[in-house]
Image (cartoon, rainbow, N blue to C red):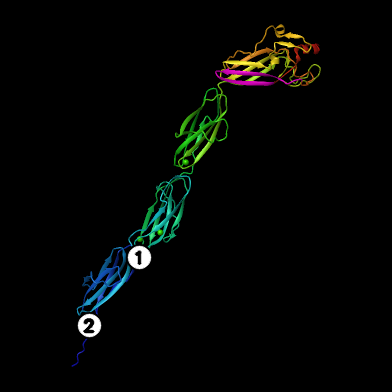
């Protein structure tokens, strides 16, 4: 008889799936073992991050089919070795199985910014741990400190930096959404970028004023845009040119400032600053504090001979309301504000002279012609900001002859109103004299 020595074949073993690309889930493999000769005994298996066959740490399972699960992040290899009862063995390794359970992230550079009025360029740098790497990412912006966001940007591919310009007035934030290659999604939100591009507004009340009392102006500065009012600088000056120094500072939004200098036109310069570097400059006025002021002076003659009319000789007269005859009575009316304590009237010396000597040496005394002397400076009575005085002009050299030839410079009248240490002056500088009232009486035909 011949005996055939039948070899006992070795078992076999394998895993399904044989590998797994990056995933953020647990990996479960079904291990199936068998033996062609029917004497399968058991399988040793072991997860390892190395492709080298382990020398220890195996797990034994006697089932022909069983599941093994890996839940830990890493790149894994599944080592399997099947045994039969004949002592035969079969080793196989499958893998890699790639597990990444860590969401990606990003950093913002800079991560925040204090109040400013300029744009902020923020570099967003995505990153990933866990092995799979950044697949893509996008961002969106908020101007209300993260309460609401705008639309997401397009995706940036891979682990690529991107610069985002933050340019809007408000409390800006950036949020990034980063995806890795294992399906993890990370969200990162920046700190706050404080941007205020809106300059403060300034108002002054009153914006202009002429007053007999010291002028008090209420200034109000208001800031919008978030950074808030830092300070308001202000200064009175006599011109509209912006002063370069000498400013006062108020940190209150509203304050008052007063002009107490008398009789000089002033302007109020105001410049307001917010905490982001914005500023607004305005100039208000004119303002003037006139404790007393002459608002009008009139001097009119009773003869009113030069009023543009045609005289009885058919001659067209010029219209000169301040041209008078010597010995003509004139009416002077002064109107003021501020209730002056005293008003003084002066004339050119020729019109104040109480004695006139003509070219022939004849002397004419004012009192002999008019009945009294007038002393200068003359102080008419003031009643409720009004003074009226009638004055008979003395004999004086003519400044114009009857043919309108100029003989000498016009005479003047000066009116001054006084109140305390303050005063105001008004000049009439075009007073002309031609002849006297008797000339007209003699030359005018009487029919
Ligand atoms: Ca076998
Ligand atoms: Ca990851
Ligand atoms: Ca990166
Ligand atoms: Ca502002």
Q: What residue did someone put label 1 on?
A: 22
Asked where in the image residue 128 lies, by quadrant, the reply is bottom left
**Residue closest to the far front:** 361
40 inside magenta stretch: no
Q: Is mark 2 within 8 Å of ligand 1?
A: yes
Q: Relative to 346, is 203 on the left or the right?
A: left
User: Residue 42 location, x and y as percent?
Assistant: 21, 74
Mark 2: give few (<14), some (14-19) or many (20+) Cα within 10 Å.
some
- Helix, strand or loop for the magenta stretch, by majority: strand
Between the residue at mark 1 and the residue at mark 2, the CA separation in whole angstroms equals: 40 Å
Q: Is residue 243 above or below residue 8?
A: above
In magenta, the rendered stretch is 407-429
**Residue closest to the far bottom:** 1
Q: Earlier in the sequence, mark 1 or mark 2?
A: 2
The residue tagged with tag 1: helix, strand or loop? strand
Residue 23 shows in the view: yes
The one nearer the camera, 55 or 155, is 55
Q: Is residue 244 above or below residue 314?
A: below
Q: What residue did someone put label 2 on?
A: 8
Q: Is mark 1 within 8 Å of ligand 2?
A: no
User: Residue 43 location, x and y as percent?
Assistant: 23, 73
């Amino acid at each position: 008889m011949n005996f055939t020595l039948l070899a006992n074949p070795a078992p076999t073993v394998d895993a399904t799936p044989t590998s797994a690309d990056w995933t953020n889930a647990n990996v479960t493999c079904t291990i199936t073992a068998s033996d062609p000769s029917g004497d399968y005994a058991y399988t040793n298996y072991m997860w390892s991050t190395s492709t080298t066959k382990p020398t220890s740490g195996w797990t034994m399972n006697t089932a022909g089919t069983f599941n093994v699960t890996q839940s830990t992040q890493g790149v894994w290899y599944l080592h399997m070795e099947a045994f039969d009862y004949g002592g035969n063995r079969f080793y196989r390794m499958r893998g890699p199985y790639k597990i990444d359970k860590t969401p990606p992230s990003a950093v913002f550079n800079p991560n925040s910014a204090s109040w400013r009025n300029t744009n902020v360029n923020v570099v967003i740098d995505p990153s990933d741990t866990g092995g799979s790497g950044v697949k893509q990412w996008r961002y969106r912006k908020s101007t209300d400190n993260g309460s609401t966001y705008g639309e997401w940007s397009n995706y940036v591919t891979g682990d690529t930096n991107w610069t985002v310009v933050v340019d809007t007035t408000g409390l800006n934030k950036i949020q990034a959404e980063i995806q890795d290659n294992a399906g993890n999604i990370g969200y990162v939100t920046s700190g706050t970028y404080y941007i205020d591009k809106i300059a403060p507004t300034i108002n002054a009340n009153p914006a202009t004023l002429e007053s007999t009392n010291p002028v008090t102006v209420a200034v109000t500065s208001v800031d919008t845009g978030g950074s808030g009012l830092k300070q308001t600088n202000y200064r009175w000056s006599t011109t509209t040119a912006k002063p370069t120094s000498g400013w006062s500072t108020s940190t209150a939004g509203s304050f008052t400032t007063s002009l107490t200098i008398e009789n000089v036109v002033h302007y109020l310069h105001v410049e307001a600053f917010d905490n982001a570097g914005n500023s607004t400059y305005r100039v208000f006025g004119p303002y003037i504090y006139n404790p007393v002021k002459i608002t009008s002076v009139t001097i009119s003659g009773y003869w009113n001979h030069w009023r543009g009319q045609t005289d009885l000789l058919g001659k067209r007269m010029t219209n000169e309301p301040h041209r008078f005859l010597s010995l003509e009575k004139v009416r002077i009316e002064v109107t003021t504000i501020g209730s002056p304590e005293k008003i003084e009237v002066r004339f050119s010396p020729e019109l104040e002279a109480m004695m006139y000597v003509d070219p022939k040496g004849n002397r004419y005394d004012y009192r002999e012609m008019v009945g009294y002397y007038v002393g200068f400076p003359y102080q008419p009575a003031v009643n409720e900001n009004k003074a009226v005085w009638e004055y008979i002009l003395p004999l004086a050299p003519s400044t114009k002859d009857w043919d309108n030839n100029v003989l000498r410079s016009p005479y003047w009248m000066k009116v001054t109103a006084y109140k305390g240490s303050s005063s105001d002056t008004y000049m009439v500088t075009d007073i002309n004299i031609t002849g006297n009232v008797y000339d007209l009486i003699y030359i005018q035909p009487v029919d």
